[in-house]
Amino acid sequence: MRKRLHEGLILLSQTISLETSDRLGSGVAELSAFRADDRPGWTREVFSEPYRASRDWTAARMREAGLEVHVDAAGNIVGRLAGRVPSAPALVTGSHTDTVDGGGRFDGIVGVLGSIEAARLLQDSGRQLERDLLVVDFLGEESNVFGLSCLGSRSAAQEMTREDLERRDYRGVSLGQAYTDFGLDPSRLSDVPWAKDPLHAFVELHIEQGPTLEKRGLPLGIVTAITGIERFIATFAGSAGHAGTTSMEDRRDAMVAAAEAVLAVRAEGCGAPTHGVATSTRVESESRSPNVVPSLVRMYSEVRSVDSSWLSGVKGRLTADIAAKAADLGVDVGFEWSTDNTVVQADRGVQDVAGAAADALGLPWMPIPSGATHDAVHMASLAPMGMIFIPSKNGKSHCPEEFSSTDDIAVGVHALVATLRHLDGADTHTSA
Ligand code: GLV
Ligand code: MN
Ligand code: MN
């Protein structure tokens, strides 16, 4: 295995041009410069000013690469490379350029810059694809202040609901209003003609965001399934009182009930039989004074797994466990549960094609599940879907330390090009 890896990478390093490395390296540097300078890391959240400004840069980069660019009604930036047969269902690739608060420079960006570079390499090869290739920078993939991920791909897949648009952020602003303020019409989000046409396949290049590929010394992972995500907001209602005079046994302390719930969420993740993770990200108390027993506390949590039968039981188990612990403390609790996405399997045929493409390049790879969610989840309802992962240094992601080398990205781009070429001639719909 080590010998093949060595040979494959040497072979490929001879193919990777300096221009490709320069474009990928400068692309990461230039795009990362669009960031909120009052926040840590490389923060470029959906609907923010740095995000708005970065989109002109991305569209210009697509045009320079020879793509015909438009912004669709869902806010996705779409670059088209014309194929030989205009009526053939298109191939689609792409990812996102928004980041989480305090995030890094590679999550999503690699898939957008990598797809633009793939379109260039396909043109430079002088062999036109049969079908159109659409390179998409999907609007707002990261979960945001509205608690909803994958805004652009969700809309393209007709999966954005009226209730979703009524979600409110901490200031009381609705998601629909945020779209309007950004210059998009929330009543037209599903009016996306390219996504209504039959599509041949969707492939997303992405960083792994975990440690497995690096630990195993592998340059590529081919995704088998993408995690499902269940989220909830729990509101704990106890009773306010003087922190100096209310005895410990007389308290109905909402903060203590929330603390018990944080531990219950963690225990749920630790108890998953195969894959499961559970995280509480925020606990907010209405009480601002240091000398008042907290009476109203809100807690935000999520649970993820690629094991849909385990994940489907989470809501019942956690609701019962947290409510029982709160009742012992004399605290009432209410839950708002929402499914961000269910578990999605990658298409078997696309996995096989991507694996064969990597083999043809002499690049070793492994099948790998994704614990992060992706635009590919929603694209899977429109086309046979697959994903290609490249290694993440120390497995770090959603933090400033996130890193993948330009060489690793270039290897991923070549695997993407080979996969797109193979898919162009393959009948994906027999294996979907
Ligand atoms: C996106 O990266 C997510 O998995 O939340
Ligand atoms: Mn991502
Ligand atoms: Mn992310």
Image (spheres, helix red, strand yellow):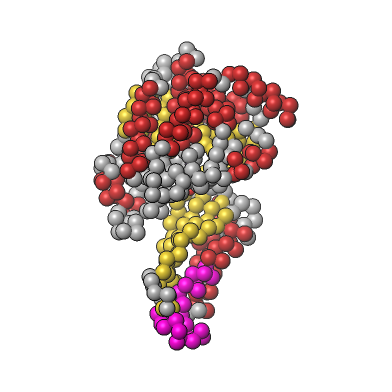
Q: Residue 355 at x, y = what percent?
A: 61, 29
The reply to whether the magenta stretch includes residue 243 is: yes
Residue in view at x 51 percent, y 84 percent: 248
**Image quadrant where one finds the N terminus:** top right
Q: Residue 343 at x, y = what percent?
A: 52, 47
Residue in view at x 46 percent, y 29 percent: 26
Q: Is residue 335 above or below residue 74?
A: below
Q: Residue 413 at x, y = what percent?
A: 53, 27
Residue sticking out furthest to the top: 126
Q: Quadrant of residue 43?
A: top left
Residue nearer the viewer, 294 or 403: 403
Q: Is residue 211 above or below residue 321?
A: above
Describe residue 328's horizontal placement relative to residue 212 as left or right: left
Q: Is residue 201 above or below residue 307?
A: above
- Does any portion of residue 344 appear in the rendered image? yes
Residue in view at x 64 percent, y 52 percent: 274
Q: Quadrant of residue 212?
A: top right
Q: Quadrant of residue 88?
A: top left
Residue nearer the viewer, 289 or 95: 289
Give the total of numbered labels. Answer: 0
Q: Residue 317 at x, y = what percent?
A: 54, 65
Residue in view at x 48 percent, y 58 percent: 281
Describe residue 287's horizontal placement relative to residue 178 as left or right: right
The reply to whether the magenta stretch includes residue 208 is: no
| Residue range of the region highlighted in magenta in the rendering | 238-261
- Does any portion of residue 238 appear in the rendered image? no
